[in-house]
Image: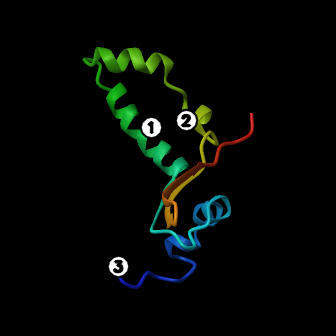
Amino acid sequence: MRSTPRTDESLRGTDYAKRAAELLPAAGTLTYDLTDGAGLLRFTNQIMQRAFADITDTAAAKLKQIWPTEQELEGTIGVSASAVTVDGNGLTYRSVLDLPSP
């Protein structure tokens, strides 16, 4: 997109985008990547639950024994962001992942 939306309903208006900006500001970057870790984890869990439903898949059955429950997954991962900047020293890649304290 040449002109991204700038409303509260846009990606930049979400809580996880705001948290990513707190952890790793996007200003002056060549690239900026943002991932809703909790959303990605929920999606992955849905896929795994479908795999676990296949009673003929022995590998999935073994993994199901150690796979965390939805409640155990809740709150384990937050937003992640990465950025690439350039200066006189070359390219710099930085990445952050918001995790809860132990």
Front label number (3 vs 2): 3
The x, y position of residue 98, in whole percent, is: 63, 48
Q: Earlier in the sequence, mark 1 or mark 3?
A: 3
Point out which mark residue 1 bears.
3
Point out which mark residue 37 bears.
none
Answer few, some or many: residues within 10 Å of disc 2's Cα (few below 14, many 20 plus, some between 14 and 19). Answer: few
Front label number (1 vs 3): 3
- Element under label 1? helix
Q: CA distance from mark 3 to mark 2?
A: 35 Å
Front in this rendered view, residue 37 or 95: 95
Residue under the image location 42 percent in, 40 percent down: 44
Taking the view exactly as shown, the residue that stands out farthest to the left is 56
Answer few, some or many: residues within 10 Å of disc 1's Cα (few below 14, many 20 plus, some between 14 and 19). Answer: some
Q: Earlier in the sequence, mark 1 or mark 2?
A: 1
Q: Residue 81 occupies which quadrant of the picture? A: bottom right
Q: Which residue is mark 2?
A: 70
The x, y position of residue 61, in whole percent, is: 37, 17
Q: Which residue is mark 1?
A: 45
Q: CA distance from mark 1 to mark 2?
A: 8 Å
Residues marked 1 and 2 touching at CB (< 8 Å): yes
- Element under label 3? loop
Front in this rendered view, residue 25 or 14: 25
